[in-house]
DNA sequence: ATTCTGACA
DNA sequence: TGTCAGCA
């Protein structure tokens, strides 16, 4: 296929296609004898993915990154492009849903108050803008692939980051108490160490991770687990889909606002009376003021509060507002589990 | 008629 | 990214 036909089919200009090629986004495009570019099927899929990534607001450079680590055989490459697109469509779908809700709120306000107070407009608009920014942030986290090769060694050796890893996973598996026939989701599944333990229960397991390299290894270790590329802020599954959700050593990577967004997403994909188990290391927070910095020696800078991220007031408040019963468990001082069960 | 490269907006 | 020029 020549460039003109392609541009018409994909709805972008020939200039844009050439530009992408020039920037290394389409490395495999062949030329005819007359210098004409000739596009094959794989180029088309790749281009389509590029367009989707662009529409999601990703910069050219970042797209290149996302499409680069392609040690994959041809058969899996197409699959990768499609998974990427599914993931992006999920984020876009959530965006649109959010906008629809915002609009609806404004209509409601207009109806009840006759006139729309300016601060309400600002409030809704700010909220919308904020949410969009938060969701777009996941792009920055797409270079997780390098870590994948050594991930399983890391969790053994880097005990600062993964304290009592094995015990924590075992504990989590016990807490979530999966039963046969249930469908569960592991968010940030990595190479499947947690989800793998749940397989013996007879439950059907799915996993989401940002890194296709991790998922590849997971697939090798546990062929039974269905995996999808995606992120915690836009879970690529329909509403009301899982009996339980687990997640280990993932939640702490999110900032407090992202954590709440993640909870909203988990809530969306969870069935009524669904349960959730979040496992992560306990983060020690120290509140250091300017005063203490100037007047105290380093050893005096006492750690003023120690708590699990999952015990953030905002997080606990969220669970209360959404009618979850929560229980918190400490494992060996350094790592904890938060078990939440939906009462609805 | 179509595509290509390069330059400039 | 759009557009335009000058070529093959």
Image: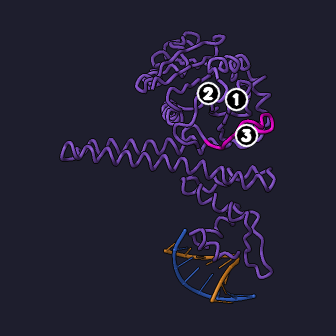
Chain colours: A purple, B orange, C blue
Does A313 sit left or right of A69 as displayed?
A: left
Does residue A301 show up?
Answer: no
Secondary structure beneath label 3: helix
Residue position for label 1 = A195
User: Which residue is drawn at the image coordinates 53% and 45% (left, top)?
Assistant: A136
Residue position for label 2 = A246
Earlier along the polypeptide chain: callout 3 or callout 2? 3
In the rendered image, the vertical position of residue A257 relative to residue A4, given as above or below? above
Query: A150 and A170: which one is in front?
Result: A170
Say if labels 1 and 2 share a chain.
Answer: yes
Q: Callout 3 environment at 10 Å: few (<14), some (14 to 19), or many (20+)? A: many
Quadrant in which the C terminus of chain A appears: top left
Does residue A9 show up?
Answer: yes
Secondary structure beneath label 2: strand
User: Which residue is drawn at the image coordinates 28% and 48% (left, top)?
Assistant: A107
Disc 3 is attached to a residue of which chain? A
Q: Distance between the residues labelled 1 and 3?
A: 12 Å
User: Which residue is drawn at the image coordinates 78% and 71% (left, top)?
Assistant: A30
Earlier along the polypeptide chain: callout 1 or callout 2? 1
Which region shows up in magenta? A219-230
Q: Callout 2 environment at 10 Å: few (<14), some (14 to 19), or many (20+)? A: many
Query: A210 and A256: which one is in front?
Result: A210
Residue A89 is labelled as none
Q: How far apart are marks 1 and 2 (CA)?
A: 8 Å
Disc 1 is attached to a residue of which chain? A
Earlier along the polypeptide chain: callout 1 or callout 3? 1
Residue position for label 3 = A215
Residue A225 forms part of the magenta stretch: yes
Q: Please state the horizontal and vertical placement of residue A142, each as a whole percent of the image.
A: 65, 43
Q: Distance between the residues labelled 3 and 2?
A: 16 Å
In the rendered image, the vertical position of residue C2 relative to residue A62, given as above or below? below
């Amino acid at each position: 296929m020549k460039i003109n036909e392609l541009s018409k089919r994909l709805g972008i200009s020939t200039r844009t296609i050439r530009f992408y090629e020039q920037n290394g986004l389409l490395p495999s495009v062949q030329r005819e004898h007359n210098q004409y570019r000739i596009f094959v099927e794989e180029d088309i899929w790749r281009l389509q993915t590029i367009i989707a990534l662009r529409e999601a607001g990703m910069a050219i450079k970042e797209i290149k990154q996302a499409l680069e680590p392609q040690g994959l055989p041809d058969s899996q490459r197409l699959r990768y492009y499609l998974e990427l697109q599914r993931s992006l469509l999920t984020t876009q779908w959530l965006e649109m849903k959010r906008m629809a809700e915002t609009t609806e709120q404004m209509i409601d306000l207009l109806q009840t108050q006759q006139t729309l107070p300016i601060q309400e407009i600002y409030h809704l608009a700010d909220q919308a803008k904020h949410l969009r920014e938060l969701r777009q942030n996941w792009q920055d986290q797409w270079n997780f692939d390098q870590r994948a090769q050594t991930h399983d060694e890391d969790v053994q050796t880097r005990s600062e980051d993964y304290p009592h890893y094995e015990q924590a996973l075992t504990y989590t598996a016990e807490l979530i108490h999966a039963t046969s026939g249930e469908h569960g989701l592991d968010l940030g599944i990595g190479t499947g160490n947690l989800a793998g333990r749940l397989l013996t229960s007879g439950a059907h397991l799915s996993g989401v991770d940002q890194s296709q390299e991790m998922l590849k290894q997971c697939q090798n270790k546990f062929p039974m687990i269905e995996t999808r590329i995606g992120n915690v802020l836009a879970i690529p599954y329909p509403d009301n889909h899982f009996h339980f959700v687990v997640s280990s050593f993932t939640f702490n990577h999110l900032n407090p606002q992202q954590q709440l967004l993640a909870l909203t997403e988990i809530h969306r994909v969870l069935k009524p009376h669904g349960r959730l188990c979040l496992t992560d290391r306990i983060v020690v927070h120290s509140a250091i003021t300017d005063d203490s910095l100037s007047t105290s020696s380093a050893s005096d800078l006492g750690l003023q509060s120690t708590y699990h991220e999952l015990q953030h007031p905002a997080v606990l408040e969220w669970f209360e507002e959404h009618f979850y019963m929560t229980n918190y468990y400490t494992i060996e001082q350094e790592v904890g589990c938060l078990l939440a069960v939906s009462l609805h």
